Amino acid sequence: MGTHVLSMLPQDCELIPHVPVVAYLTHLARLQGMTKDEARKTAEQRLDEVALGDRAKSTVKQLSHGMK
């Protein structure tokens, strides 16, 4: 059985609001121990899963409250 990590981040938590969303998610994945390539790929996949792939280059601050 593989290891799964469940993380929680409060909706209003904008630790790095000026960076692109995909970079922010990649950073959080790297903190969970993923390699740079794995983290980037996972971040892009998760954005696509929630229909936000087109907002990957937007900054966290530019996202609406519901998108966060």
Image (spheres, grey):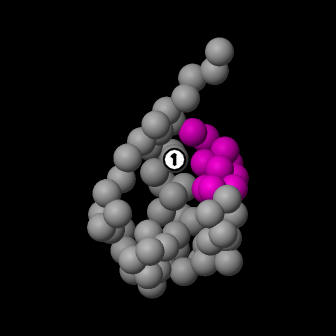
x then y, percent, for residue 33: 51, 36
What residue is rendered at 44% in x and 81% in y? 64
Identified by mark 1, the residue type is Ala
x then y, percent, for residue 61: 39, 80
Quadrant of the image occupied by residue 44? bottom right
Does the stretch in magenta take in 68? no
The prevailing secondary structure element of the residues shown in magenta is: helix
Near-viewer residue (48 or 34): 48
- The quadrant in which the C terminus is found is bottom left
- The quadrant in which the N terminus is found is top right
What residue is rendered at 54% in x and 80% in y? 58
Q: Is residue 48 above or below residue 56?
A: above
Quadrant of the image occupied by residue 15? bottom left
Q: Which residue is mark 1?
A: 29
For the view shown, which residue lies furthest in the top direction?
1
For the view shown, which residue lies furthest in the front direction?
66
Near-viewer residue (46 or 21): 46
What residue is rendered at 65% in x and 50% in y? 42
Total numbered circles? 1
x then y, percent, for residue 23: 53, 64
What residue is rendered at 61% in x and 41% in y? 35
Q: Is residue 53 above or below residue 25?
A: below
- Can residue 44 be seen in this snapshot? no
Q: Is residue 65 above or below residue 28?
A: below
Q: Label 1: state its secondary structure.
A: helix
Does the stretch in magenta take in 38? yes
x then y, percent, for residue 25: 51, 58
Region of the chain picked out in magenta, as a range: 34-46
- Can residue 12 be seen in this snapshot? yes
Few, some or many C-alpha atoms within 10 Å of disc 1 (few <14, some 14-19, many ≥20)? some
